[in-house]
Every structure is written in C-alpha cells, then in structure tokens.
C-alpha cells in the first residue's frame, strides 16, 4: 500500500480528510446559526421599526378607514301544539327548529324582507348578512343580522323574525313561534377588532423584517474578513493590507502615528550625524 509524503496510506488519508470535512461542516453549521443570531441583533432596530410601522398602518386602517360592522340578534322560541314537555316534544321541537332555519333560505322570505325595509341588497347579499344558531338541546333560534348600519341590522333581524313566524302560522298551519327577545340597536361594532388587528400587524411586520434579513444573510457570499477566508476557502491569512486611499476618519490607527522627520547634519569636519 502506497504512503504519501506525511507517512499516511491513501485509505488513512481519505478517512482523515472525510473526518476533517465532517467536523468542518458541523462547525460551519453551528457558526452559521451563531452568525445569524448576531446578524439579527445587529438589525434589531430595523425589526422593531418594521413592527411599529406595520402596527401603525394596520391600526390607522382599522380606526379610520375600515367600515365598522354592527350585529343585532333576535330570539324566537319554537313551540308545538302539545303543551306537555316530554322527550318526544323536545325531539319534535328540535326538528322544527331545523325546518325554520331552512325558511330563512327561501327566496320569497328574503324578497319580502327586502321589500318591507326597501333594502339595496340582492337575495344572496341579504342571505350572507344573516346568521342562524340553535343552542344544543333547546328550541330557541337566534337570528343575528350584521350590517354597517346599526339600525339596519336591528330592523333586518326583527323583520326576519316577524316574516318567519307569520309563514309558519299561515302556510304550515302550526302554532306561531314566540318572540323571546327582539333585536336591539348595538352601539359597539363587532368588527373590526382594532386592538387585535394592530397587534397582528406588528407581529407580521416583525416577521417580514426577519425574513428579509434572513434572506439577505443566506444570499450573502462575500468574503469580508480573514476569518471568512479561512472558513470558506480553507486558506490561512498571511498578511492584511490596509485599503488604498484610507482617510483619517476610517483608519485612525494609521493617522495616529505621525511621520517623523529625519534631519541629517553635516558638520564642517565632514562627519555626518543624525538629529
């Protein structure tokens, strides 16, 4: 088996090189994470600035531009003809509640609401403004209406309640549902949530800044110091030369040392001296 100039066989040299490369790769990965951390610290004010700017923009939009949405809710109680409250009655009531929910999707019911309130919406648009909920094991139906106008939201919820109750009584020939609670005009909008939107804007702005800094860090392949040269190229640094045209502002080390003037005295006896 052939030996190289340092006394190692080819196999041993390959194993040593592989081990050295593995160690270098592991060290490089650790150093990269550490460098990334320091890069983030160096640009911490950019991250904070991006978070504040995004929070201000989103907050300004939520407070001054976004249209507030108000919600009003009416509640009706679904009853059956049999006044006795038993298990079968509860099951029938739950089934009727599901049937009533389908009434709100009927085109004629929505058109009647539009005509009564003279609304500038289509049937599909009005349907998106209504939300129906039925709490578990109850025969209570919640009719929630959302609108940019608080009074309009209240009127839509109450009008839907009236029309559905009349439809049940006239067409189904069943006992009319009872109104538990009429919708009231809300003074506080349900959206936008200004505080939450502002916080989310700040977090998104910070993450965007971190992403940009990370991308610049990954794409930066310039050699900036002797340490980078040894790390990426594997060559030692023999000497470091100062930049040409260095000014006092950039290189104080060189400007701090003033050049000394050497004066040669020539005495009359012909011997030279240095002063």
Image: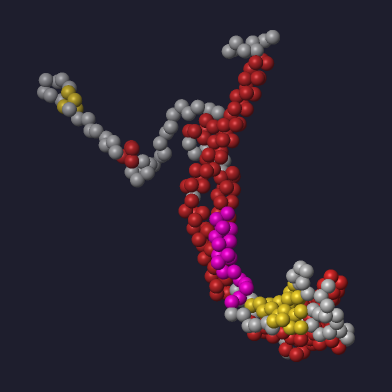
Q: Image height check: is 21 above or below 177?
A: above
Which quadrant of the structure image shows residue 167? bottom right
Identify the magenta region: 188-207
Q: Is residue 230 above or below residue 246?
A: above
Q: Is residue 249 visible?
A: yes
> In the image, 237: left or right of 8?
left
Residue 221 drawn in magenta = no
Residue occupying the point 83% across, 73% down = 86
In the displayed structure, 108 sits above or below 69; it is: below
| Residue 21 vs residue 158, the one in the foreground | 158
Residue at position x 56%, y 40% in the image: 33
Residue drawn at the location 60% of the way across and 31% of the way down: 26
Foreground residue among 89 and 242:
89
- Of the pair 63 and 205, the residue shown nearer to us: 63
Tell me if 86 is positioned left or right of 195 in this view: right
Q: Position of residue 22 (x, y in %)?
A: 62, 27
Looking at this view, name the residue that lies furthest to the left.
268
Where, by quadrant of the figure, is residue 142 drawn?
Answer: bottom right
How many numbered marks appear?
Answer: 0
Q: Is residue 67 above or below residue 39?
A: below
Q: Residue at x 58, y 65 (%)?
A: 197
């Amino acid at each position: 088996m052939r030996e190289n100039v340092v006394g190692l066989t080819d196999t041993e040299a390959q194993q040593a090189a592989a081990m050295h490369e593995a160690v270098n790769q592991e060290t490089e990965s650790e150093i990269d994470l550490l460098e990334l951390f320091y890069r983030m610290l160096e640009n911490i004010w950019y991250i904070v600035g991006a978070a504040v700017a995004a929070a201000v923009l989103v907050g300004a939009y939520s407070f001054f531009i976004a249209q507030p949405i108000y919600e009003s809710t009416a509640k009706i109680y679904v009853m059956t003809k049999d006044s006795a409250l038993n298990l079968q009655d509860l099951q029938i009531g739950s089934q009727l509640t599901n049937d009533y929910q389908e009434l709100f999707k009927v085109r004629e019911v929505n058109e009647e609401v539009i005509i009564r309130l003279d609304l500038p919406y289509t049937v599909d648009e009005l349907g998106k403004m209504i939300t129906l909920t039925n709490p578990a094991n109850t025969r209570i139906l919640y009719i929630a209406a959302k609108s940019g106008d608080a009074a309009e939201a209240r009127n839509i919820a109450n009008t839907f309640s009236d029309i559905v109750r009349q439809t049940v009584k006239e067409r189904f020939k069943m006992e009319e549902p009872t109104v538990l609670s009429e919708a009231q005009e809300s003074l506080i909008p349900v959206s936008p949530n200004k505080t939450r939107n502002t916080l989310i804007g700040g977090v998104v702005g910070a993450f965007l800044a971190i992403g940009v800094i990370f991308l610049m860090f990954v794409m930066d392949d310039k050699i900036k110091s002797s340490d980078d040269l040894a790390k990426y190229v594997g060559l030692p640094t023999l000497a470091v030369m100062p930049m040409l045209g260095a000014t006092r502002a950039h290189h104080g080390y060189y400007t701090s040392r003033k050049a000394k003037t050497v004066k040669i005295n020539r005495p009359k006896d012909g011997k030279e001296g240095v002063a």
